[in-house]
Amino acid sequence: MNTTIDSDLADLIRQIFGAGDVTDRLSQTTDGVAFDDGLWKQLADLGLVRLTGTEAAGGSGASWYECAALLSEAAANAVHLPLAESDLLAGWLLDRAGLPCDDSPRTVAVADSSGRAPRVPWAGEVERVVAVVPRGDRVTVADLAAIQVEATRLPNLSGLPAYDVEVPAGLSGNTVDPGVLTTLKLRGALIRAIQCVGAMERILAMCVEYAGVRVQFGRPVGRFQSVQNLIADIAAEVALAGSAVDAAVVDAVETELEGAASVYRVAVARSCVGHAASVVVRNAHQVHGAIGTTLEHPLPLFTLPVMDWRGDFGGTLFWDRVLGALVESDPTALWELVTAGSTAQSDPRALVAGVVA
């Protein structure tokens, strides 16, 4: 991420997340990621768990810039907590619904009419679940204790916690406009893009370091042109994805992802990140060879979450189709779409709801 934040905050975040040392996290892919209550309390004391919440409501009043730095650094250090789910999703949604929020860890479960919500991150690990149930032309939002929902953990190669959730029938709560669901999807999609870029930047650094110290045939493998090409492709993809995500973060700061160009910016970011992930993960494991697949090596701590995150809130195919639908909605205004993010004839937010992937 290239957004500029206060240097003291950046140093604090790096210090908290271990400054690159992941030796105590190597078991994540085998034992699964568990909620770290001690680290959560430490972050809460520092005002980092509700970073973007309003000061009037007990938050820190920061922007997407600061939150993006927090999420990126966490991903780059294989530190997994529901920071984004609790602040940028649940906290934001509760504020929209006029419901109170505190520092308790939360996630969001968007259920169908039967009350089922698939693949909800952290649902069985957090204290509260913000349930969202569409009902006709309104959407019901309720802040539930975790024991009020039924959560079944799903198998996951990355070890990241994901659950199928069933919310109670006859759910009561406050109502919001259905348009909130589109914004929620955009926010979630951008969150995962930020995390992917943070992890991919770490993968790039690991490849450069490994290629410089691993000696084969009498010289470091980084001296071989084929390995150099692999790393160069990783660097190019990470730079492209990072630039696209930076543009979407700027849009989030300026419009809260409710602007005319928001759908386009997020779709571009997710498309770039999704395609970059394939190249980055494949090439990184080629650079490292067999050692990079072992349980003792940290590379899977980053490659597996990247492949997991890129499927959340719409996979790469979904966001590619959103971009295609935007172009198709007004084929004569391609330049306007690229430069402005929308055209006079398109309804980007409706396209997100209408795309099936």
Image (spheres, helix red, strand yellow):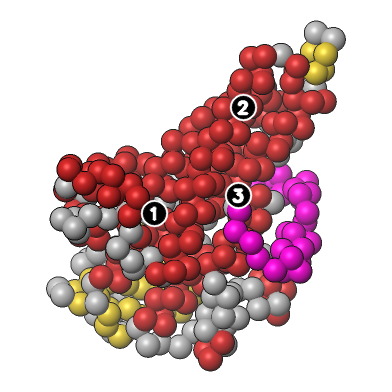
Q: Estimate the x, y position of residue 343 in percent, counting from the top left.
A: 22, 55
Categorize mark 1 by other alpha carbons within 10 Å: few (<14), some (14-19), many (20+): many
Residue identified by numbered label 2:
232
The residue that disc 3 covers is 198
Q: Which region of the structure is painted magenta?
A: 2-29
Number of marks present in the image shown: 3
C-alpha distance separating marks 1 and 3: 17 Å
In space, the residues marked 2 and 3 are separated at their CA atoms by 18 Å
Is residue 3 magenta-colored? yes
**On screen, 135 above or below 117?**
below
Q: Quadrant of residue 62?
A: bottom right
Number of other residues with Cα within 10 Å of mark 2, as a class: few under 14, some 14 to 19, many 20 or more: some
- Spot occupied by residue 268 in the image (x, y as percentages of width and height): 38, 47
Residue type at mark 2: give it. Answer: Ala
Q: CA distance from mark 1 to mark 2?
A: 25 Å
Q: Amino acid at mark 3?
A: Gly
- The residue sitting at 80% across, 8% down in the picture is 217
User: Visible in this render: residue 247?
Assistant: yes
Residue 233 is situated, as x and y percent measured from the top left of the image, at 57, 27
